[in-house]
Image (spheres, helix red, strand yellow):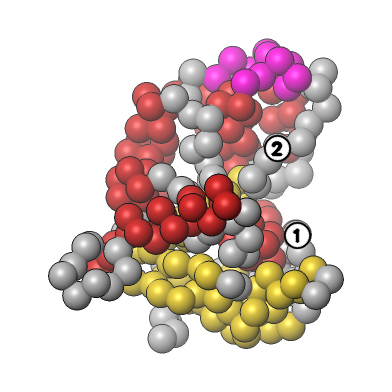
């Protein structure tokens, strides 16, 4: 069902790598002000979908709208208004965190250096560390600061909590993302952690074989005697697929 205030909508999206259909007729509507978790197994198409939505990948068929914009034709405008954390961050090893944030900020008209500094302090991120010396968790913090410091209307996050310690995960999920939701901004995130999803999300989408097979309010994924798909089983199935792939 289409939401009149959708911040993201997609119709019949298809992406093919060789003979493999990574996205296969995907339809999606994301309501404004929601924090939506996208779950699914390895190869389900989660990262591919996010790349299409931020204009980093052109779909083979179908259409998408992000904040009313076409990411294929208006990718720069989309990225000005969206904060994106990719599944991995690639930076020259000798580049310091502070230098990279300054570089990113030079491309963002709404970049707020004071907000970048505040977020770095909140996440206990040492900005003078070189990228090659950063742990996985430190790199994740740097990516989050870069995605948030231009005060985006929408956040698109691919495994944003990977490598973060428990204290930092709580700061991000309860502090930062909770504030964004209260402020009416929207979040679409990929996560394999049941705790993180239950802590921050109010909606869940299950992606399998390139299509959304189920979506709804978080409460609708509670385990039931009817044997329906619950959140735990959806995430567990994704983890098992990754182990066996």
Q: Magenta region, mostly helix, strand or loop?
A: loop
Q: Which of these two is toward me, 102 or 123? A: 123
Q: Residue at x 37, y 24 (%)?
A: 167
Q: Which residue is mark 1?
A: 56
Would you say residue 148 is visible in this rendering? no
Quadrant of the image for the C terminus? bottom right
Name the residue tied to disc 2: 89
The extreme left residue here reads: 225
**In the rendering, at what x and y percent does residue 120 appear?**
53, 24
Kindly indicate whether the residue at mark 2 contacts the one at mark 1 (C-beta within 8 angstroms).
no
Q: Is residue 107 above or below residue 208?
A: above
Between 26 and 153, which is closer to the camera in this rendering? 26
- Image x and y of residue 8, in percent: 53, 71
How many circles with numbers are drawn on the protein?
Answer: 2
> Which sits in the foreground, 33 or 90?
90
User: How far apart are the alpha carbons under marks 1 and 2?
Assistant: 14 Å
From the viewer's side, name the closer residue of 59 and 221: 221
Q: Which residues are magenta?
A: 125-135
- Where does the N terminus fall, quadrant-wise? bottom left
Relative image position of residue 225 (x, y in whole percent) = 16, 70
């Amino acid at each position: 069902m289409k939401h009149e205030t959708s911040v993201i909508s997609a119709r019949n999206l298809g992406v093919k790598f060789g003979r493999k259909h990574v996205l296969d007729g995907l339809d999606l509507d994301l309501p404004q002000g929601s924090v939506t978790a996208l779950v699914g197994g390895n190869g389900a198409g989660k990262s591919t979908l996010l790349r299409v939505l931020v204009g980093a990948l052109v779909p083979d068929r179908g259409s998408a709208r992000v904040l009313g914009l076409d990411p294929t034709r208006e990718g720069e405008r989309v990225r000005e208004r969206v904060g994106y954390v990719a599944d991995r961050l690639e930076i020259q090893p000798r580049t310091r965190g502070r230098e990279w944030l300054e570089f990113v900020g030079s491309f963002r008209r709404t970049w707020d250096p004071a907000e970048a500094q505040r977020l770095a302090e909140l996440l206990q991120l040492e900005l003078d560390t070189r990228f090659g010396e950063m742990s996985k968790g430190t790199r994740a913090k740097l990516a989050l600061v870069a995605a948030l410091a231009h005060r985006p209307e929408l956040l698109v996050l691919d495994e944003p909590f990977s490598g973060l310690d428990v204290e930092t995960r709580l700061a991000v999920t309860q502090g930062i993302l909770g504030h964004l939701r209260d402020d009416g901004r929207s979040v679409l995130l990929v996560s394999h952690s049941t705790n993180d999803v239950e802590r921050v999300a109010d909606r869940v989408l299950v992606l399998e074989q390139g299509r959304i097979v189920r979506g709804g309010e978080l409460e609708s994924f509670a385990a039931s005697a009817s044997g329906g798909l619950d959140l735990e089983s959806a995430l567990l199935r994704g983890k098992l697929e990754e182990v066996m792939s």
